[in-house]
Image (cartoon, grey):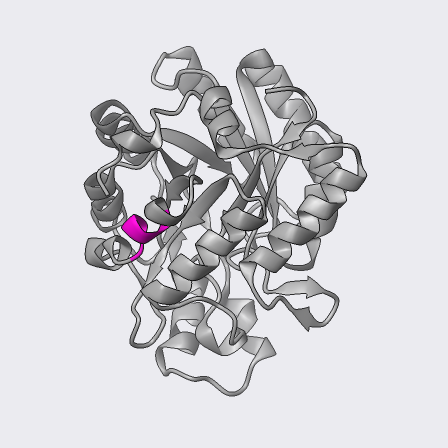
Amino acid sequence: MTDNKVIITCAVTGSIHTPSMSPHLPVTADEIAEQAVAAAEAGAAILHLHARDPKDGRPTADPEAFMAFLPRIKQACNAVVNITTGGSAQMTLDQRLAAPLRAQPEMCSLNMGSMNFGIFPLQQRYEDWKHDWEPDFLEASRDTVFKNTFADIESVLERLGNGCGTRFEFECYDVGHIQTVAFYLASGRIKPPVFLQFVLGVLGGIDAAPEQLMHMKATADRLLGEAYRFSVLAAGRHQMPLGTLGIILGGNVRVGLEDSLTIGRGRLAESNAQQVAKIRRILEELGYEAAAPDEVREILALKGGDRVAF
């Protein structure tokens, strides 16, 4: 893959935003599949996927909820499927791993440290809720630790990595998480090429600022050398500006309704594909090209879409 190719990841629904926040947030298997495929058609080479209870939109770890849309996405497009192992801070590790272990995807996310993960401030922006669970779910993050211990990380690397041939999007919410990646790379538990996702703007992690992105990249350069590639995920209104900066710095980018519900100031995005199309226009104006899924498989040494279990 040439240096001007940029990997676009689309995080389709996540477990942060709730149905009351946007009518465009996909909830049902039909909605998730349709929006994922449209995002791929718009230029996303990787689709990062969570599942939701179709009755009320709450995040779920149920493998059956994932299997309701995974085969449909695979049949409809060539994108790399990346399943969360983060799920929600309110799920156990075994719950979070149930669907990935069943599906055995090409990629999974892997959070590289325990942290406070504060989504409770979102309550203050809304008054009318479609479902009773929504404000309580947000408030629970005030007193919940998102647990990703060294033992948890090692379990995921062994069970999914060695056990299923799955490779990882290592989600780094702060610079210390990059040190953890470097530790496991040096010990041989992680093998290059390493794909880092710099996550900026989550309350409890590093803040969304250009200086912090530069600091994250400088830390990864020092600790990982030539063994890694990076992508930028910036929450909310920072999504497009910091994603663009990441591209300019030689990285890749993640967009999607998991990370931001808007397409511009005060304007809700109508779909994931709309965000993908916007960042693709930006990167093409800057002289880059969106990487195709098979190019991503080559550069990240993925096992191939024919070796998954869905």
* Quarter of the figure with residue 102: top left
| Residue furthest to the bottom | 128
The quarter of the rendered structure image containing the C terminus is top left
Looking at the picture, how far across and down is residue 300, in whole percent?
47, 23
Check if residue 71 falls in the magenta segment: yes
Tell me the residue at 65%/52% (across/down). 277
x and y, in percent, of residue 42 in the image: 58, 49
Q: Is residue 130 left or right of residue 226?
A: left
Q: Nearer the viewer, residue 292 or 125?
A: 292
Rendered-image quadrant of the N terminus: top right
**Residue 297 inside the magenta-drawn segment:** no
Taking depth in this image into account, of 197 and 112 the one nearest to the observer is: 197
Task: Classify 278 as above or below 219.
Answer: below
Circle count: 0
Residue 40 position, x and y percent, is 51, 47
Residue 86 in view: no
The part of the image, by quadrant, that contains residue 225 is: top right
Residue 137, how many percent across, how many down?
A: 39, 70
Identity of the residue furthest to the front in this view? 76
Residue 261 lies left or right of residue 212; in this view the side is left
Q: Is residue 213 left or right of residue 231?
A: right
Q: In this rendering, does residue 71 appear at all?
A: yes
Establish if 161 lies above or below 255: above
Magenta region: which residues?
Answer: 69-73
205, above or below 297, in the image: below
Question: On the rendered structure, is 225 left or right of 66?
Answer: right
* Residue positioned 68% across, 24% down in the render: 218
Tell me where residue 221 sits by quadrant: top right
Q: Main secondary structure of the magenta part?
A: helix
User: Residue sitting at 42 percent across and 45 percent down?
Assistant: 77
